[in-house]
């Protein structure tokens, strides 16, 4: 790994923090992706529009990044059906846990939420166990 990786990680983290802060400060919404995506069709039309713009912005930036820096995206080691299944399981888990890593780990912890601390510790422990079971 080069030192550039650390700079990119720092810049990416700063952009996530800035985005979460801006959405909360300017619009009063918490930047939890599972809540944003999960409520695309459930809320009133006025509440849906900002969600659609947010999701389209995230997808758009991903698309642009894949075109400008294709080597940073890489090839997935899993098949498309397995990725879809994993995505559905993550979606189910985030609904069960009442939030995702951005909602709890970034926004909840920054607001000193005890529920978010517990959720983030469970996310991290689950990830640690999964990686160690799969790759050791």
Image (cartoon, grey):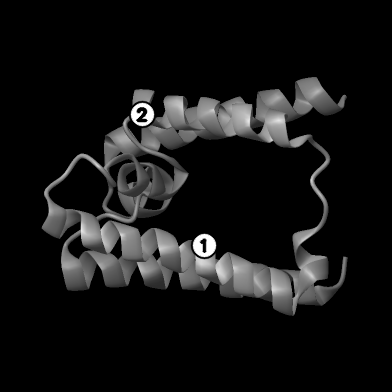
Of labels 1 and 2, the one closer to you: 1
Residue 135 coordinates in the image, percent (x, y):
85, 28
Q: Is residue 10 visible?
A: no
Residue for point 40% across, 49% down: 33
Q: Is residue 4 visible?
A: yes
Give yes or no for contact between labels 1 and 2 (Cβ–Cβ under 8 Å). no
Q: Reply above or below: 89 against 47.
A: above
Instruction: State the residue in front, 98 or 74.
Output: 74
Rendered image: mark on residue 77: none
Residue tagged by mark 1? 59
Residue 132 coordinates in the image, percent (x, y):
77, 26
Residue for point 43% across, 46% down: 105
Badge 2 marks a residue whose secondary structure is helix
Q: Earlier in the sequence, mark 1 or mark 2?
A: 1
The picture quadrant where one finds residue 115 is top left
Residue tagged by mark 2? 95
């Amino acid at each position: 790994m080069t030192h550039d990786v650390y700079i990119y990680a720092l810049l990416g983290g700063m952009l996530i923090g800035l985005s979460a802060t801006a959405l909360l400060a300017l619009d009063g919404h918490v930047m939890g992706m599972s809540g944003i995506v999960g409520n695309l069709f459930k809320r009133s039309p006025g509440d849906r529009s900002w969600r659609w713009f947010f999701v389209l912005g995230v997808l758009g930036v991903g698309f642009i990044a894949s075109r400008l820096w294709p080597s940073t995206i890489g090839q997935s080691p899993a098949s498309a059906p397995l990725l879809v299944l994993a995505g559905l399981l993550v979606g189910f888990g985030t609904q069960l846990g009442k939030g995702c890593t951005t909602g709890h780990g970034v926004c909840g912890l920054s607001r000193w939420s005890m529920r978010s601390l517990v959720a983030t510790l469970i996310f991290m422990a689950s990830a640690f166990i999964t990686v160690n079971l799969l790759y050791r």
